[in-house]
Image (spheres, rainbow, N blue to C red):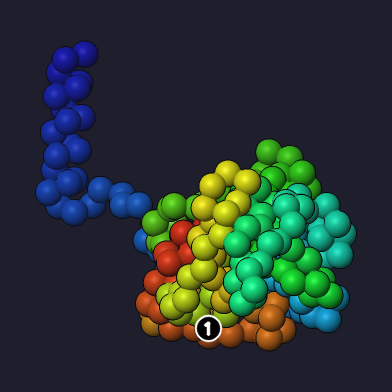
Amino acid sequence: MRGTKRVLCGLMAACWLAGTMPAAAARPEIAGLQVPVMCQKPELYNGCEVTSLAMMLRHAGQPVSKMELAAQLRKDLTPEVRDGQGRTLSWGDPNRGFVGDITGRLRGYGVYHGPVRDLLEARMPGKAVDLTGSPFETLLDTVAAGRPVVVWTTTQFRVPAAWVYWRGPDGTVKATFSEHAVLLVGYGPQTVTVNDPLTCSVRQVDRASFRRSWEGMGAQAVTYR
């Protein structure tokens, strides 16, 4: 047995030195998924998150309307309080649920990854994956594996320039009214491809700028397995 182990070790070392050991599959330089675009407007003026989720669910073979998802999404019903100059003093927490009015008939903000992940889990039990805080390369690997990703960014795909703060149910909420969510469906060496529910289009975005905006929004992302 010891002799056999020595032979195997010797063979492995020889293969390693010869460069013939099997390597992990490299991520392809370019990847893209065909996912039909859905528009958040006119029904859901502030509904970028559930519209992006609806696109992803359709790709996963679980079609559902954005309106049904909007009805099922957890809400934080904490009322908004503003001062005499219109600045928000207190409101809900997007980590708890959607803040404000998703339809846009009244003032609204948005929702973050936790409630969206929970809604995805309700639609696909045992399948939801929260990639928040993962390396950006994990998002690319997921797309390369054939699964789109709901990603939080900003409407201009830039690092948020203007933050606002208000009192929430669990403490101070840091927010930006340029908050946005899109569906990541592809990438190349210099760009990423997203389904943008706000413009109702497939968009090519500078990869480095997109990554910085995603990181600026807390590196939030949700997909499925």
On the image, numbered disc 1 is attached to which residue?
156
Residue drawn at (50%, 79%) of the image = 157
The answer to whether 69 is drawn above or below residue 7 in the figure is below
- Find residue 33 and report its horizontal and vertical position in percent: 62, 72
Residue situated in front as seen by the camera: 148 or 54: 54
Left or right position of 166 against 218: right
Left or right position of 98 against 180: right
What amino acid type should be assigned to the residue bearing mark 1?
A: Gln
- Find residue 186 and report its horizontal and vertical position in percent: 54, 74
Report whether residue 51 is seen: no
Farthest residue, direction top: 1
Left or right position of 195 against 190: right
- Find residue 145 and report its horizontal and vertical position in percent: 54, 59
Residue drawn at (77%, 44%) of the image = 122
Residue drawn at (39%, 56%) of the image = 135
Q: Residues within 10 Å of mark 1 (few under 14, many from 20)?
A: some
- Find residue 61 and report its horizontal and vertical position in percent: 78, 58
